[in-house]
Image (spheres, grey):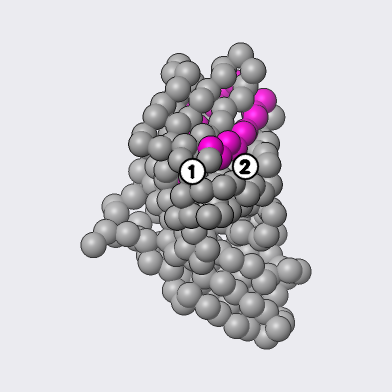
Amino acid sequence: DGGITQSPKYLFRKEGQNVTLSCEQNLNHDAMYWYRQDPGQGLRLIYYSQIVNDFQKGDIAEGYSVSREKKESFPLTVTSAQKNPTAFYLCASSMRTSRIEAFFGQGTRLTVV
Amino acid sequence: QQQVKQSPQSLIVQKGGISIINCAYENTAFDYFPWYQQFPGKGPALLIAIRPDVSEKKEGRFTISFNKSAKQFSLHIMDSQPGDSATYFCAASPPGNTPLVFGKGTRLSVIA
């Protein structure tokens, strides 16, 4: 089955630790995105990548980093510099020519204690 | 200019009623307007979308109405059902290879 897989579903980390969230897609999509979702805040764009080895900052990139070494994979690292990392993180992908049809993963809920 | 304003933030509708969610935008260069539906603990999924040269699009019980001159669009859910209870996001597609701009979401509860 084609789709986007985010892992893990739940993640707990201690304050001050970096943590990496995984996102893999087998849809052969060019573009991939990371969003953060907080109650009442909607979907806020963290980073996006249109092609391999290239990515751009979104609206709230501070405290996050990404890499795009393979078309299928777009991991997100939440660094210790992110002041408020507890949130629901969503990965998405789309064809570059049809970005409105973004397919989302099931999300990772990160809790930092 | 890149914002999409969505209202209401939350909505409670009786079973069988009509749910209406509204969105407004400023950037006239937006060229596509999708709606996403998200159930708790899941990722959003594309529900229905419309281009700005169309005033209305209907898919089953879901209808998008688009008013280009007012720069507004809305989602109507006819005969709302408890299974429609979810968070709905409107979005707009900027020109070029830039990501969708999302509204802040509307949490819909359909009660029996």
List x then y, in percent, for residue B59.
Answer: 36, 34
Q: Residue at x 59, y 43 (%)?
A: B102
Which contiguous range is marked in magenta?
B18-36
Does residue B19 appear anywhere in the picture? yes
Cα separation, mark 1 vs mark 2, equals 26 Å
> The disc labelled 2 sits on which kind of residue?
Gly
Does residue A73 appear anywhere in the picture? no
List x then y, in percent, for residue B112.
Answer: 53, 55
Element type at mark 1: loop
**Looking at the image, which is closer to me, B67 or A25?**
B67
Pick whichever of labels 1 and 2 is earlier in the sequence. 1
The residue beneath circle 1 is B16
Are the residues flagged by discs 1 and 2 from a single subunit?
yes
Q: Residue at x 49, y 43 (%)?
A: B16
The residue beneath circle 2 is B103
Q: Verify whether residue B24 appears in magenta.
A: yes
Element type at mark 2: loop
| Res. A82 image quadrant | bottom right
Q: Chain of mark 1?
A: B
